[in-house]
Amino acid sequence: MTARQMQGWRDRAAVSFTAEKQPAHGSRGMVVTNHPLASAAGAEMLAAGGNAIDAAIAALFTLTVVEPMMVGIFGGGLSHIRLHDGTHVVLDGLSAAPRAATPDMYRPVSDRMPAYMETVDRENTIGAKAVATPGTLRGWCDANRRFGRLSLADVMEPAIRHARRGFAVTPYLAACIAEAAADLAGDPEIARLYLPGGTPLAAGHRLVTGDYADTLASIAAEGPDALYGGALGRHISDHMARAGGLIGLDDLMAVRTIDRPPVYGSYRGFDIYGPPPPSAGGVHVAQMLNILEHYDMAGLGFGSVESMHLLGEALKIAFADRAAATADPAFVQVPVEQLMSKAYAGERRGRIDTRRTASWAPGVVSSESANTTHVTVADAEGNIVASTQTINGLFGARFIIPGTGIVPNNYMALFDPHPGHALSIAPGKRVTTSMAPTIVFRDGQPAFALGLPGGLRIFGSVMQALVNLIDHGMSLQEAVEAPRLWTQGEALEVEEAVPAAQRDGLAARGWNVLPVAHVGGGMTAIAFGPGGATTGAACWRADGLAMGLGGGLARAGTRFWPDAPNVTLEAD
């Protein structure tokens, strides 16, 4: 964006803010993750001759060490890959319900919100019965094998190094440990690591995870089959059986990564590609942008009551349709074309009252955790990766499988515990997610790649970042850090940076306004410029860092002694 465009959005903005972090710039690649050591691991792969896929996978393995509360090899996620030849693929490594799972395996505590997804004794959230069959490791290894340039051992080396040597606990990680401490105390293995002596680790403590280093080393040597059928998998399935879990060795051996084509939408001349179902992200980002395209969002100004009202109404519509129809397409007929059509957006938009919020029912026939991570990577060859991965809840199911260092997911919490609905449990059914790893083009060239953690708040935050970039003319750093809002139909969450005057204006339109510290998690994004230039940005909501590669190799023909080619060096 030009300086004039950026000044234009500031002049029209009703909410002002100052970005807290600085962007990075590069010409030979960019890595943006939610931890400095993970960004460094990705940059190390690019410097070693690897490509964006190698860098992304190295960063993700490292995040399992330094962001253990968010992501792990026993989780699930999506990798949106755009290869230098223009090919797009979304690798679906989402978790699935075990074969022994049944629609009525839990006892729901209520048939009404907000407790609708809760179960007796929190069985779908804490402990072995909450764990779904993991697709993460298979998905990462498949991406590395099919599209990477370096070996699996190479891309795993930084993660093993940090696990064995240790790393400094950040204030963010320390706060997460303290938040989950009551549950972590219930498992001796995880308590020994994160609550030594019964006290949560403090920021600055050096955390060494030796068991996990050994687990990663065995995978680096044996490949993913160490988990999906090998000795590691047998050890895990035996433990799960003893602990009352449902995952058996047959579940692990059946895990496969699914190739899915991205869904496509357009917004004011930009082409937007995102993940298809069972992700809700791509479909509903496009749906909301189709609704907003009719309005002069730029003219309304960033953070105005009018623009925030429209964002909230678009979110309500998307969540009404998501609940009714977006799920694993192997089990549910998802009306993707209808949801993403401009005509359908026009029908839904026709009911919006710009002066008053409304209740929205689904327009099509018929509680996700915020604790996730995201990496965005680009290399000098034109390969781009936007990958969102998670163990679902903060520290997943909140135990460690003894002797492995593995924190398993609690993905079963994403299924509807009530039988007979689109999101109800079925054996082998993949979870529905709000992940939205998104890549945007203009005139056939990459413009932006972005994504974030945040559970149900993910795709709404992606939508808002795109409006910030396209309509408001923000810089990339401003777009990822700008105050956000969110609703799925009840309270309208607005970040605390939104002034009281705007909140009062929304309340006057019928909104139940709820100020919150943050909406969603740490967005990581890349903007593409001419000549291979890239800008990377991470936001204040996590420990994110952008790391760009510039410079390059020596000019051809350069010698150590260019002015004296015949000089002979003598030893002392």
Image: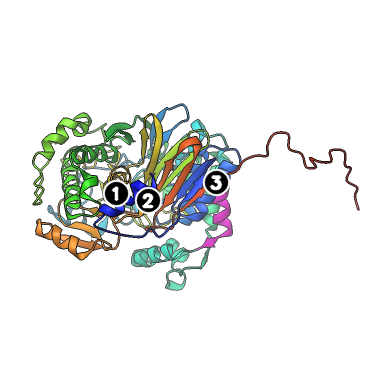
Query: Pointer 2: what residue?
Result: 523
Density class for disc 3 (Cα within 10 Å; few <14, some 14-19, many ≥20) is: many
Q: Is residue 545 above or below residue 517?
A: above
Q: Say which element carries label 1.
A: helix
- Inspect the magenta stretch and tell me whether residue 159 lies in it: yes
Q: N-terminal of the two: label 2 or label 3? A: 3
**What colouring style does the render use?**
rainbow
User: How far apart are labels 1 and 2 at the CA level?
Assistant: 9 Å
Density class for disc 2 (Cα within 10 Å; few <14, some 14-19, many ≥20) is: many
Query: Pointer 3: what residue?
Result: 43
The spot of residue 41 in percent (x, y) is: 54, 48
Dots 1, 2 in contact, CB < 8 A: yes
User: How far apart are labels 1 and 3 at the CA level?
Assistant: 27 Å
Q: Residue at x 31, y 57 (%)?
A: 126
Amino acid carrying mark 3 in the image: Ala
The region drawn magenta spans 158-168
The spot of residue 251 in percent (x, y) is: 37, 39
Q: Quadrant of residue 21?
A: bottom left
Q: Say which element carries label 2.
A: loop
Q: N-terminal of the two: label 1 or label 2? A: 1
Query: Pointer 1: what residue?
Result: 461
User: How far apart are labels 2 and 3 at the CA level?
Assistant: 18 Å
Q: Residue at x 42, y 27 (%)?
A: 87
Quarter holding the N terminus is: top left
